[in-house]
Amino acid sequence: MAAGTFARCCGCAVLLLPLTAPAQADTSAIGRIIADTAATMRTNTYFYGALSTSYAASENWGGLDLRHHAFSGNLLYRHTAAGSGRSHLHVAMADLGYLKFVDSTWVKHLDRLQVALLWSTAGRRVRRSWSAALSTQFLPTALLEYDLAEGRTRERAVGGFLNPFTLEAGHGVVWSFWEKSSIDLAFATVRLTASPKATTAPAFVDARTLEGDKAYYFLSYGFSFAALIDRPLGTRVQWLNSTRLFANGIDRDHVNLSFSNLVIVKLWTYLQLRLDTRLAYDPLVNYDLQFRQEVLLGFFYERTH
């Protein structure tokens, strides 16, 4: 029977249609929609990798001479897309560094993995946003402990990948500026934190939500602030900043801060000078504000498309 003709079955008229033609039409229509959507999306991908080394010599107030070498690697990946009524910003940052004092062994002094995902409506500078962020480390941390039986200090490996970790999910508004920079204010943020048992401050042990074999887990709800800045300062200088703040109270027990500021001076084709400043505050570890300042000379690779 020819396609598109009528047949009668049980007294009813049934239209027989070809099986292939509609499928081809639907596939073609879906393909056009996907192609039109892809054509309207504006995407940008940026990758940065660097290897740096440094040597420092100093003398403290007690007259103790301190000398050390440092070696570190850094990676930054960013992908942005905008169009069709929506946009997103995905950023991944990884750092791993080792420090060696003279006549000593290499010790880890920098270990970080951060992934930040930001989705928003497109159009205006201030838009609705949905965000997710993960922060953890790659390798275990060496904890120094004094062994009374042996009368000497020993190292014990603590934590590792996803111990500790912080996972946040929030909803709020985002403000975009300087083409590649943004500030996200998530008024409703859920935060899940894992903290190694060996390094968790005793005052917070009873506040845990769950207890695992090697870590305590804390669940909290509050407000978060996230800034991602990528700003060229001329043709040879670039400013990169990543700042995250979470708070569900106004006292020192309910605030967490992570601040990373990098000024890059491109000296030559693959040679650069980096001024790296970092601040961190985590009451689960201690109440002291952690600060680190480094000036490094290293090689880098950069690609944008």
Image (cartoon, rainbow, N blue to C red):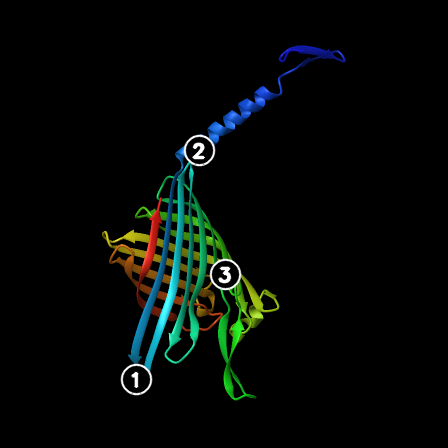
Residue, x 54% and y 69% (percent of image)?
A: 196
Q: Amino acid at mark 1?
A: Trp
Q: Which residue is mark 1?
A: 61
Q: Which is in the foreground here, disc 1 or disc 3? A: 1
Q: Which residue is mark 2?
A: 37
* Sequence-wise first label, 1 or 3: 1
Q: Which residue is mark 3?
A: 166
Q: Secondary structure at mark 3?
A: strand
Q: Amino acid at mark 2?
A: Thr
At label 2, counting other C-alpha atoms closer than 10 Å, the crowd grade (few under 14, some 14-19, many 20 or more) is few
Q: Amino acid at mark 3?
A: Thr
Instruction: Pinpoint residue 8: horizontal percent, then vertical percent.
Output: 72, 11
Quarter location, residue 208: bottom right
* Sequence-wise first label, 1 or 2: 2
Q: Secondary structure at mark 1?
A: loop
* Sequence-wise first label, 3 or 2: 2
Separation of marks 1 and 3 at Cα, in angstroms: 38 Å
Above or below for 71 versus 143:
above
